[in-house]
Amino acid sequence: MANDNSLTDDLLAVHVNGLTKNYGQTQALKGIDLSIKKGELFALLGPNGAGKTTLFSILATLRSPSAGFATVLGKDVVKDRDAVRQSMGIVFQEPAIEKRLTGRDNLELMGLFYGLSISKSKVRATELITSLGLEEGADRPAERLSGGQRRKLELARALVTDPGILFLDEATLGLDVDARRAFWGHIKGLTESGRTVFFTTHYMEEAEVADRIALIDAGNIVALDTPRALKSRLGGGVIRLSTEDDVKAKAWLIEHGYTTESHSKELMLIHPDPASVVPELMRNLNVKVQRVEVHEPSLEDVFITLTGRKLAGETPAGEGRGKGGKWS
Amino acid sequence: MIRGIYAIVILDLKRAWLDRARLVAGLAQPLLYLFVLGAGLGASSQQGAVEYKKYIFPGVLGLSLLFSAAFAAIVIVFDRQIGFFKAVLVSPLPRYAIAYGKITSGAIQAFVQGVIVLPFAPLAGISMSFGSLIQLILSMFIASLTFSALGVAVASRFKSATVFPIVSNAILMPMFFLSGALYPLKNAPHWMQVATHFDPVAYAVDLMRGSILGVFYFPPALSITVLVLFVSTVSWSAVSVFKRGEDDSSLGATQFNWRR
Ligand SMILES: Nc1ncnc2c1ncn2[C@@H]1O[C@H](COP(=O)(O)OP(=O)(O)OP(=O)(O)O)[C@@H](O)[C@H]1O
Ligand SMILES: [Mg+2]
């Protein structure tokens, strides 16, 4: 057994076993098991309060677990904390740049904090500014950058030491669609060069860029697979109905051998062949149907069937979540 | 580690430079003491106004160092709220480097403020030989370090900057008044003379006064020893506060603490 572990350890970027975390009475994590391969782009998707930041913080050595263990690049996050810190980069849910200083100053200082020499940290800052396309604005106080530029600067800050693994906590919070796409483009590039990226999000579109997704809800991982496999779990398509009397309609559906998603508040059924069944439903249902919606299963649907709850913030652009993303 | 201290110092000085207007504003308090209090109290002292101004000049210099060091230290409370420090705290930089960096940067800021007060010495009727100027500058340096270490040790224990006025009134002012900055200690009541022995500000002010006027209340060697001991114990205590945050479970939260 011990041999097995050491063999796989070489290939694993993150290994988590039986991890729990309590905050007083609150059980934020209830026994997480997780393995992430090196070079993987891994998403942790879940609604507000699911425990994403908590898991993220434990992996990034910011908090200690209540029980269980976790290793990052083969190093224990508690016992070998400094080694983990040396080899990781981190982007927080909140801004972590000194906004009054320029982007370049921020990057140079961070290099010094990571033990680079003065000249090396200057060179590194310039490298990062160029590779992230931040030339315009790098010498302005960071508070006068656009939201997208700031998040890029955060990423640059996390990359100062060229880390083997990158942790991102809701890294694109408050960005518009274009800026998000550009951001994930960079991240993709990083994983292609062999780095591992672990990110949390509650936007399902965002999670779909990942190689694998763990769905987390109330401190448990409820599913873990590739985006495609997760969606094909549902098979076929999703039918959503809104009727004059959902309770009655539901009873009818069950009576006629349909399985509705019991978790869901609205009427939702999953069917291998929605196109053929919808006309029949419309004809036979004993209550008036106001609206019917048929679509390919999304991660949202997967989440609802597993937990009965919605992911928050399906529309990432333009909404104000009033937390975290605030700059000042 | 040296790089880490250097980085903290550079960070703080860059930010302080953005607030350089504070250096000018920082002149108001010492000049008020020197020329208003000095003129008023001096006129009614047996020494006369001119002698009195000369006498309190080093005290006012001490006041300026004390308060600018305290102000520099209070930034720690705000730092706790900015994300940048979260990034610093998850770097492999040892915590004691942060504490030493903070003490160094506070001392530099205080010293610079003191240097800005220095040109007013002739207006207080002081003329100094080059030798005593050097002595004074060295004393100012020790004093800045002392006050900065004190400031960092105190500020690192607070979570909110709103306590600053309380700290200032409960710790800084008594230390300043007890130090003999504004009146000769040798005429003070006995209890005060005893209390003064426990006041680092008194030793620092006395060193500076001795450098200017050539008359010391404490033997200079004693003052230097006391101040060096004070700086080391207080720095050590500041480091221990920063270290307590080592396993900082609140780091992941929006606000975090140096200590838990
Ligand atoms: N420092 C803390 N003290 C007490 N409870 C906490 C603390 N931090 C988080 N919690 C609780 O733990 C649970 C998980 O919180 P966590 O921050 O991990 O959620 P999250 O998935 O990151 O949510 P969000 O999407 O809002 O960022 C929540 O119920 C939260 O209230
Ligand atoms: Mg979170």
Image (tube, rainbow, N blue to C red):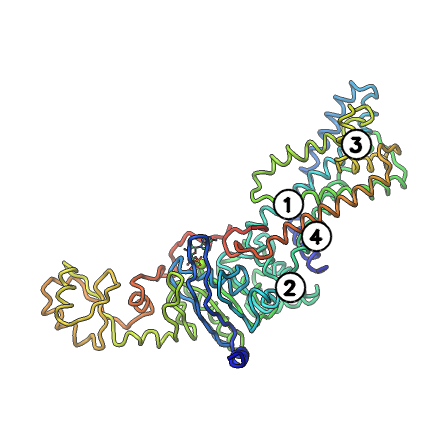
Chain containing the residue with disc 3: B
Image point 86% across, 43% down: which residue?
B134
- Describe the element under mark 2 as helix, strand or loop: loop
Q: Are marks 2 and 4 on the same chain?
A: no
Which one is in front in this view, the residue at disc 2 or the one at disc 4? 4
Contact check, label 4 and label 3, Cβ < 8 Å: no
- Confirm or deny contact between disc 2 and disc 1 (CB under 8 A): no
| Occupied quadrant, residue B118 | top right
* Subunit under mark 1: B
Q: Which residue is mark 3?
A: B57
Mark 3 C-beta closer than 8 Å to ligand 1: no
The residue where tag 4 is placed is B100
Q: Which residue is mark 2?
A: A114
- Vertically, is B85 above or below B183? below
Instruction: Give whichever of A260, B46 is nearer the camera.
Output: A260
Q: Nearer the viewer, residue B31 or A210?
A: A210
Find disc 1 in the rendering and name its residue: B19
Q: Nearer the viewer, mark 2 or mark 1?
A: 2
Nearer the N terminus, badge 1 or badge 3? 1
Distance of label 4 from label 3 (alpha carbons):
30 Å
- Residue type at the position of mark 2: Tyr
| Mark 1–mark 4 distance (CA, rounded to whole Å) | 22 Å
The location of residue B106, given as percent across then percent down, is 70, 46
Q: Is mark 4 within 8 Å of ligand 1?
A: no
Q: Residues within 10 Å of mark 1 (few under 14, many from 20)?
A: few
Q: Chain of mark 4?
A: B
